Image: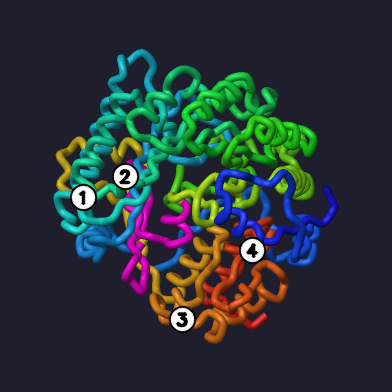
Amino acid sequence: MNEAISIDIQSLDRDLRSDEHKAPRRARALRRPRHGALEILDAHPELRQGQEEYNINVTSQTGNKLLADQTFREIRTHDGADKPAHLYFHVPLCDYVCKFCNYVKRLAPRDDDGAALNLWTNLLIAESTLYLDRCEWLGRADIQSLYLGGGTASLLRVWHLERILAHVREHYALAPNAEITLEGNPDNFLEAEAADAARIGFNRFSLGVQSLNDRVTSFTGRKHGAADSLRAIDKLAATGKPFNVDMMFGLPHQDVETVVTDIEELVARGVPTITIYRFRNALRHEMGIGNKSAWNNAQVITHMASEGLFPTLAQTYAMRDAITDVLLANSYYPSPCGWWSRLGTYPNGNIPQVSRNKWQHFDTMIAFGPGAYGWLSGSRHEVVQTHNIQDIAAYLQHMRDGATEPPLSFGRHLDARQTVATVLGFAFKANQPIELARFKSQYAVDLLHVEPYSTVLGHLLKTGFLEMSADGRSVRPTLDGETVHEEIISHYLHKTIGDADAVACKR
């Protein structure tokens, strides 16, 4: 696990171009050594983040806050016609609520004959229709990716999914090769659900497994076991469509041995993409992007900490290092950061289209459902973030009162620096070449020669978190940068650049 590992990215890219379907058996050796996470944090203590500080979020928490009507005015007047865009539908229902989850969700009613599923299908279509009726450009945007998430989107039955897809196909300019993803838990894909979804047009899936250790899943409140997870993986594999399996590390009752055993099982089964997430306990509800989780309670945190249930920072990062050693040795590579795919899983950089739209290109994203958030970009020099009402009861009330405007809560207008910080954060997350000319043409910023960007990027290049392309036209995260990518995005990009932290910029 402590042995240095590195990857020649250009060799990997050549492999992808020459043979998308044939992955090498071993990771290629190296231009740059990969360091362990703790070694990196020892050298860069500013990147250390505890469980309550750590948050997987690359949207900005700064900017001029807009009222709901101001936000909708920005959406209506957006110049988005004929430009690439991404659609997200948030289904806020779950069969059970995981103790670590701080996304917007509620328990699905039992024995209601599908009334709740019908309701939320109607509500999401109604919200989308509100936008289409008032935003002339939206029906002409080039929709390159569509994602149904949650909550648990795959709780919807095939006829609900068909209604949403029919609505999108009829009213949006859905690209012929659009990537259409359905997200769910193992217990939602145990029978014919995946095959049915593929039949009606879903061509990618996301499966939230989190752990194959039944002790871990039981403690976190999940209602499936390892056998269910493996059965669901087999069902998804049988569709022939790409899919990712989400796995967490740093949870109670996990250690290096258990997480490595999990990843080795997934690798042996040929899972196309294995996404790895560090457990976090940040207060997303205070940021306007989530609900409070069971473990966000201060008394619960104190009790669990006193019992030694939370792995330490050292133990957590040791898990990540061990996981990525296994993945690299089996020809997986992260694109975007944290999303490790077998070579040849996706074309043109081996990155899913949803990640290309949202992160690499930062295309406009319109999001429906309670707590959903998106942004307006494209021809804009400054970005506007959009945030829906996150309280589910308030969202329902708004929509049931015969709403004539979408259920927006607020927006954020980012100034030029905050915009560049946010776009850079997304680009770093994508783990694709960050084209310097793009920032010059779209944002009028020379990243390598204008402060504060030049100091920050120069520091990231000097410390080995970024590397320059041979032609000098782009930079790209290294494996060290990928290891602590969220910490880098938070500290160097959002805080140092986005918040105009002059002291940090001069460091």
Earlier-in-chain disc, 3 versus 4 = 4
Instruction: Kindly check if marks 1 and 4 are in contact, taking CB atoms under 8 A apart as contact.
Output: no
Q: 57 above or below 154?
A: below
Mark 2, Cα crowd under 10 Å, few <14 / some 14-19 / many 20+, is many
The residue singled out by tag 1 in the image is 131
**Which amino acid does the dot numbered 2 rest on?**
Phe
Q: Quadrant of the C terminus?
A: bottom right
Left or right: residue 233 versus residue 466 is left
In three-dimensional space, the C-alpha distance between marks 2 and 4, rounded to whole angstroms, equals 39 Å
In percent of width and height, residue 337 lies at 59, 54
Who's the residue at 20% across and 64% down the image? Answer: 77
The residue singled out by tag 2 in the image is 368
Instruction: Kindly check if marks 1 and 2 are in contact, taking CB atoms under 8 A apart as contact.
Output: yes
**Which amino acid does the dot numbered 1 rest on?**
Tyr
Query: Where does the magenta region start and end?
Result: 355-384
Q: Which callout, 3 or 4, points to the residue nearer the camera? A: 4
Mark 4, Cα crowd under 10 Å, few <14 / some 14-19 / many 20+, is few
Left or right: residue 92 versus residue 43 is left
Q: Judging from the image, what secondary structure is the residue with disc 4 in?
A: helix
For residue 445, the mark is 3
The residue singled out by tag 4 in the image is 10
In three-dimensional space, the C-alpha distance between marks 1 and 2, rounded to whole angstroms, equals 10 Å
Q: Does the magenta segment cover residue 171? A: no
Who's the residue at 56% across and 68% down the image? Answer: 493
Q: Residue furthest right?
A: 3
